[in-house]
Amino acid sequence: MNKYIEALNTLMNEYDAYYVENKYGGCTHPKEFEILYQLKGDLVINAIGWIKNCYDCYYKNEMDEKSAFGYLKALAERKEDDGENQI
């Protein structure tokens, strides 16, 4: 599993945008977000912003290929396959 997929899985299972430290303080998962910022694509910033500001565990079962996680996962898988990841 590549580092991008690992970061996405960690965020999906552990991150909560409404946790006080994430909402008003620092961030509980800076390493994972730093890794995801390395991906390139038209909507990377928007997808990461949604995860950072809106995601909580209630959305976990609604994640599909059209979600922020799905978009970033597609980029990560493409990067793993051919070294390039622009979508």
Image (cartoon, rainbow, N blue to C red):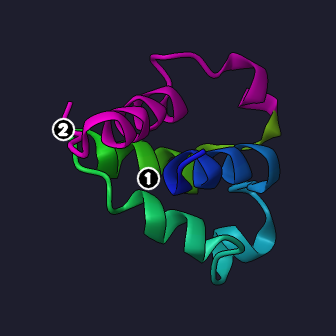
- Residue position for label 2: 86
At 31% from the left edge and 52% from the top edge, which residue is drawn? 39
Q: Secondary structure at mark 2?
A: loop
At 51% from the left edge and 64% from the top edge, which residue is drawn? 33
Position in image of residue 11 (x %, y %): 68, 52
The part of the chain drawn in magenta is 58-87
Query: Going by the picture, which residue comes out furthest to the bottom?
Result: 26
Position in image of residue 26 (x %, y %): 63, 83
> Image height check: is 71 above or below 27?
above
Q: Quadrant of residue 36?
A: bottom left
Q: Secondary structure at mark 1?
A: helix
Q: Quadrant of the C terminus?
A: top left
At 45% from the left edge and 17% from the top edge, which residue is drawn? 66
> Image height check: is 10 above or below 43?
below
What's the residue type where badge 2 is placed? Gln
Does the magenta segment cover residue 35? no
Of residues 60 and 38, which is closer to you in this image?
38
Does the magenta segment cover residue 69? yes
Q: Earlier in the sequence, mark 1 or mark 2?
A: 1
Left or right of residue 87: residue 54: right
Give the spatial CA distance, label 1 vs label 2: 18 Å
Of residues 87 and 16, which is closer to you in this image?
87
Of residues 72 and 18, which is closer to you in this image?
72
Q: Quadrant of residue 76?
A: top left
What's the residue type where badge 1 is placed? Gly
Q: Residues within 10 Å of mark 1 (few under 14, many from 20)?
A: some
Numbered mark located on residue 49 in the image? 1
Q: Quadrant of the N terminus?
A: top right
Does the rendering let one see residue 53? no
Does the rendering let one see residue 48? yes
At 75% from the left edge and 76% from the top edge, which residue is drawn? 21
